[in-house]
Amino acid sequence: MGPRPRPSRRGPRGDRGGQVSIPAQSAPSGQPGAAGRPDARIHNIGYRRYEGARLGASYARRSLFVHSLRGSFGIGRTARSKVLPFGLFAIMAVPAVIMVAVASTTGLDELPVEYTSYALFMQPIVGLYLALAAPQMVSLDLRFKTIPLYFSRPIDRFDYVAAKCAALAAALFLFAGVPLTIAYAGGLLAKLGFVDQTTAFGRGLVATAVFAALHAVLGLLIASFTPRRGFGVAAVIGALTIPYFAVTAVQAVAEEQGSAGAVGWLGLFSPGSLLDGLQSKFLGGTSGFPEELVPSDAAGLGYLLVTAALIVGSYLLLMRRYRKAGL
């Protein structure tokens, strides 16, 4: 084997095209495949500054809101991800259609279920949807460590939490509000009375908005403590159902023992019963408490304060959760 040629001391020369030619070298002994390879070329294309429009933090917040809202219904994801959200939505809307059909065929003067009570009447379905949507919004970001990617853009922790809460509240409002709109349109077509139906529909939208805001912050707060989506689903369902059934059972016992005044105060200890007391006291709805008991004035003030405290407190705890996690 002949002597190995010595490489030139001049080094590689750059040509006019911004390219640098590096001569191929023979492969060392025992390393096949390196000899005979073509010359390597480095293309000096340089870097260009971004000269387009910088949309800023407001656009990033809107994009995060829209992305989260679409994801809560499985839009933009696989077809399998759309089955449960839209299936639950169909179940949510079926009673509204049935109410309209019954009212129009039997000649009723009003719908069988009040607008303010519809979300509470369908609370198990809304709870299942919340248990699916809340972990999907926050647990996956925690699991796959994508939070720093959001914060690398011109948004901070406040923007992230606000966008997520607004998106889930909007999703819950649509989930429960669209069936109300169906019932309202059907009631007008059935000639149930424009003024009465419009007034009741407006009160129903107010009750639905409070319901959505409260459950959105509670669901996100619970789901944010685990990166596992399955654990988040179970935790949200448990946090909503266990207190509600416990309060309902204790209210029934209190009513049987003649403590009717305690029934209204007991409703403060569950999100579902809390909203039931609000809609019956302030929105003219029928109470779901034993004997259709309406809370007293003092208890009604307590319902307002506890609802506001839960919404604000859960939001602040959610902010603290992301700060404590170092995100």
Image: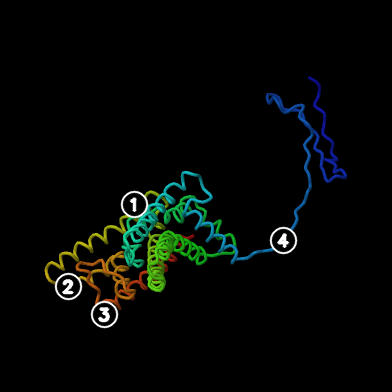
User: Considering the numbered disc 3 on the image, is that residue within a helix, a strand or a loop?
Assistant: helix
Q: Mark 1 to mark 3: distance in Å? A: 35 Å
Q: Position of residue 130 (x, y in %)?
A: 39, 57
Residue 221 in the image: x percent, y percent? 39, 61
Q: Nearer the viewer, mark 2 or mark 1?
A: 2
Q: Which mark is residue 260?
A: 2
Q: Nearer the viewer, mark 1 or mark 3?
A: 3
Badge 1 element: helix
Q: Earlier in the sequence, mark 3 or mark 4?
A: 4
Q: Residue furthest left?
A: 257
Decide which of tag 1 and tag 3 comes sooner along the chain.
1
Q: Residue at x 38, y 68 (%)?
A: 204
The residue beneath circle 1 is 234
In front of the other: 301 or 24: 301
Tell which residue pokes out farthest to the bottom in this image: 297
**The disc label shown at residue 265, or none:** none
Residue topped by disc 4: 52
Tag 1: amino acid? Ala
Mark 1: few/some/many CA within 10 Å (<14, 14-19, 20+): some
Asked if the residues shown at circle 3 and circle 4 are in contact, with their CB atoms under 8 angstroms apart, the answer is: no
Estimate the x, y position of residue 203 in percent, counting from the top left. 38, 71
Question: Is 290 left or right of 138, judged from the image as shown?
Answer: left
Q: Which residue is mark 3?
A: 298
Query: Which badge, 3 or 2, comes first in the chain's sequence?
Result: 2
- Rounded to the nearest angstrom, the CA distance separating label 3 from label 2 is 14 Å
Of circles 3 and 2, the one toward us is 2
- Marks 4 and 1 sit apart, C-alpha to C-alpha, by 46 Å
The mark that comes first in sequence, 2 or 4, is 4
Residue toward you, 295 or 229: 295
